[in-house]
């Protein structure tokens, strides 16, 4: 497998053109924003159980409701390739995007974009997994090619899985595979093992010969799923952040429990992600959702968040994911509440800022 430097990856022309077209606001939206004196913001998302509240919010008018409250326009855009969505954010084509904690660090932050972790929505509690074809023990992965999105959180997850059986990444061969291609690639003869996430994980696991040998419930709290935003956009207009947080927690309040409204909301999210309600609920069962903003705030303020970040940044540096110019693990600064800083305080590029979620917890949005 060729070495990949995600910070200098060439954009796929076709995907980029599709995203740019989707990102362009419609004429009536531009007129509406101009008439209200507000700005237009573009927010990207990809299919994942913990991120399906976003398209549901758009479908039901909740996005528009909160955008109107703050006099802005929010265009929500689905991007089929997860890494491409982060490329677009890094390139300034998106003002916010769904991301894991590690990918926020190694793509936009490492690419020089000042990035804020606006919403910590959940952590993967079984939604990421390692699959083997025709083998039932993780130790049997030694010497095999492993298909995954190289340089993403899947590589971190694979390394943690290998550690559990005394193996290293050098004991396997990494094969870079887009998440959009994972399901189609699995039945081919060359694929022997894969590290991926839901919904691809669940779909592949149902195929003949596929065996799930390790999942993220073994490393709880390490793979965070977030909404990240441009720090500059938030500084220019904090109402953009308030609107996103308001959207998020309104939907999370609607989707919990067994009431007809909650079931209808999750059924819609299931359909939007290409599955049915039982399938979607099964994915949520392996997603530790922070349904209450106070719980997400508590996590960001906790020593556990700092410890997880330290593990992720050290892995990322060793793997060269900070880019060729990074001379140490401290090259990129990461901030947490209460003045906690990891890395270079003169080069802060990733900020865990729970202040907007705290507003939601206090009913102050």
Image (tube, rainbow, N blue to C red):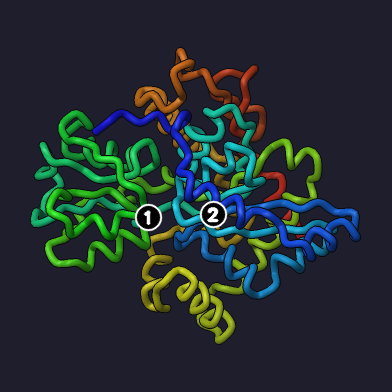
Give percent across and percent down for residue 157: 32, 42
Above or below, comparing residue 75 to residue 3 in the picture: below
Residue 217 makes an appearance in the image: no
Callout 2 crowding tier (Cα within 10 Å): few <14, some 14–19, many ≥20: few
Q: Is residue 127 left or right of residue 96?
A: left
Give percent across and percent down for residue 58: 64, 68
Frontmost of labels 1 and 2 is 2
Quadrant of the snapshot with the C terminus: bottom right
Which of the pair 358/233 is nearer the observer?
A: 233
Residue position for label 1: 180
Give percent across and percent down for residue 39: 81, 51
Label of residue 121 in the image: none
Q: Quadrant of residue 74?
A: bottom right
Q: Is residue 156 left or right of residue 245?
A: left
Q: Is residue 136 left or right of residue 85?
A: left
Q: What whole-number distance in Å separates the C-alpha atoms at marks 1 and 2? A: 15 Å
Above or below, comparing residue 224 to residue 343 in the picture: below
Quadrant of the snapshot with the N terminus: top left
The local secondary structure at tag 2 comes to helix
The local secondary structure at tag 1 comes to helix
Residue 258 makes an appearance in the image: yes
Which of the pair 2/209 is nearer the observer?
A: 2
Question: Which residue is found at the position 44% from the left and 52% from the top?
Answer: 81
Question: Which residue is found at the position 54% from the left and 29% from the top?
Answer: 111
Callout 1 crowding tier (Cα within 10 Å): few <14, some 14–19, many ≥20: some
Question: Which residue is found at the position 47% from the left and 30% from the top?
Answer: 7
Residue at the extreme top = 327
Sequence order check, earlier mark of 1 and 2: 2
**Is label 1 in contact with label 2 (beta carbons under 8 Å)?**
no
Residue position for label 2: 18
């Amino acid at each position: 497998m060729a070495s990949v430097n995600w910070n200098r990856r060439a954009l796929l022309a076709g995907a980029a053109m599709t995203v740019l077209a989707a990102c362009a606001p419609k004429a009536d939206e531009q007129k509406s924003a101009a008439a209200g004196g507000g700005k237009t913001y573009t927010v990207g998302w990809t299919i994942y159980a913990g991120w399906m509240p976003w398209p549901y919010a758009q479908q039901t008018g909740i996005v528009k409701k909160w955008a109107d409250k703050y006099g802005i326009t929010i265009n929500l855009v689905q991007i089929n390739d997860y890494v491409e969505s982060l490329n677009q954010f890094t390139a300034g084509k998106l003002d916010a995007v769904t991301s894991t904690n590690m990918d926020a660090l190694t793509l936009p932050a490492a690419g020089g974009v000042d990035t804020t972790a606006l919403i910590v929505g959940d952590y993967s509690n079984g939604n990421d997994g390692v699959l083997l074809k025709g083998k039932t023990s993780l130790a049997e992965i030694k010497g095999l090619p492993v298909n995954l999105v190289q340089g993403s959180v899947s590589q971190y997850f694979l390394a943690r899985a290998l550690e559990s059986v005394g193996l290293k990444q050098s004991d396997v061969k990494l094969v870079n595979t887009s998440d959009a291609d994972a399901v189609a690639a699995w039945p081919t003869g060359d694929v022997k093992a894969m590290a991926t996430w839901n919904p691809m994980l669940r779909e592949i696991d149902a195929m003949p010969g596929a065996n799930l040998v390790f999942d993220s419930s073994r490393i709880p709290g390490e793979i965070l799923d977030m909404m990240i935003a441009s720090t500059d956009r938030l500084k220019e207009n904090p109402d953009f952040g308030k609107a996103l947080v308001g959207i998020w927690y309104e939907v999370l309040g609607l989707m919990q429990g067994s009431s007809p409204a909650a079931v209808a909301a999750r059924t819609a999210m299931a359909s939007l992600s290409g599955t049915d309600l039982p399938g979607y609920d099964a994915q949520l069962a392996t997603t530790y959702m922070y349904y209450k903003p106070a719980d997400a705030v508590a996590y960001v303020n906790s020593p556990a968040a700092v410890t997880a970040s330290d593990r992720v940044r050290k892995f990322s540096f060793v793997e060269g994911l900070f880019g060729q110019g990074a001379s140490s693990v401290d090259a990129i600064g990461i901030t947490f509440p209460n003045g906690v800083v990891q890395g270079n305080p003169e080069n802060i590029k990733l900020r865990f800022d729970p202040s907007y979620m705290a507003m939601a917890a206090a009913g102050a949005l």
